[in-house]
Structure formats: C-alpha cells, structure tokens
Image: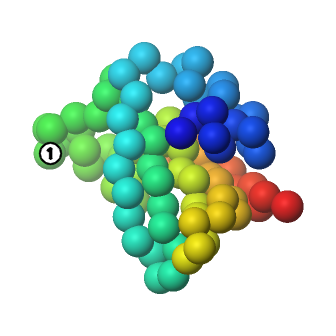
C-alpha cells in the first residue's frame, strides 16, 4: 500500500522507510474510508500511557483518505503533540 499511495504522495514512501514495525487499521468516516498506518514502536496497551496521546491519536500515524469509490483524495499525518498536517491530492 505504501507503493500505491507513494505514487501520489511521497510521504508514504518516507513512512515506509521510517516504520520499523508497520501496521494498519481501517475505519469508515461518513462516506470516506480511512487507512491508518502506524508503527508498533509508538503503540501501547497501557491505559496510563494511552491517555498521553492527544485526542486518542497515536503519534507518527499516517492516514490515507479514500472517497466512496476508493480514490485516494487526501492524507494527514499525526505528529507528536497532536498537530496534524493535512494535504489534499489533486
């Protein structure tokens, strides 16, 4: 999937290089489908540590947003501290 999305947004190629233990999960958000990439190095099963994440979002996660037809339309990157970078694909 990194190769597929990396053709339109090079951050996916960089993330493939960065992630040592890559994982992904999918979610539905309205009419959009989300593919959320993470790295197990930044995951926890501890309730205490999990509360440190801003809005429950894991740091260093990269989300591909697909429209209802499955077209890649945007992505966002969750930085530490809860700051998101959003980019729309043209």
Query: Residue 45: where, in percent of width, then height?
Result: 15, 38
**Foreground residue among 57 and 7:** 7
Residue at horizontal 62%, vertical 53%? 76
| Vertical order, 85 against 16 (above or below) | below
Could you tell whether 2 is left or right of 13 in the image? left
| Vertical order, 90 against 2 (above or below) | below
Q: Residue 50 is drawn in which quadrant?
A: top left
Could you tell whether 23 is left or right of 75 in the image? left
**Is any atom of residue 84 visible in this view?**
no
Residue at horizontal 63%, vertical 41%? 4
Residue at horizontal 47%, vertical 53%? 35
Could you tell whether 76 is left or right of 7 in the image? left
Q: Check the picture and name the quadrant holding the C terminus.
A: bottom right
Query: Residue 78: where, in percent of width, then height?
Result: 54, 46
Q: Residue 69 is drawn in which quadrant?
A: bottom right
Q: Which element is circle 1 on?
A: helix
Residue at horizontal 58%, vertical 18%? 17
Q: Residue 62 is drawn in which quadrant?
A: top right
Residue bearing mark 1: 47
**Foreground residue among 55 and 20:** 20
């Amino acid at each position: 999937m990194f190769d597929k999305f990396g053709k339109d947004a090079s951050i996916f190629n960089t993330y493939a290089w960065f992630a040592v233990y890559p994982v992904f999960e999918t979610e539905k958000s309205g009419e959009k489908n989300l593919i959320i990439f993470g790295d197990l190095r930044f995951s926890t099963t501890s309730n205490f540590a999990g509360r440190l994440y801003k809005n429950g979002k894991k740091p260093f996660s990269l989300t591909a947003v697909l429209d209802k037809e499955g077209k890649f339309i945007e992505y966002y990157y969750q930085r530490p501290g809860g700051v998101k970078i959003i980019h729309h694909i043209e």
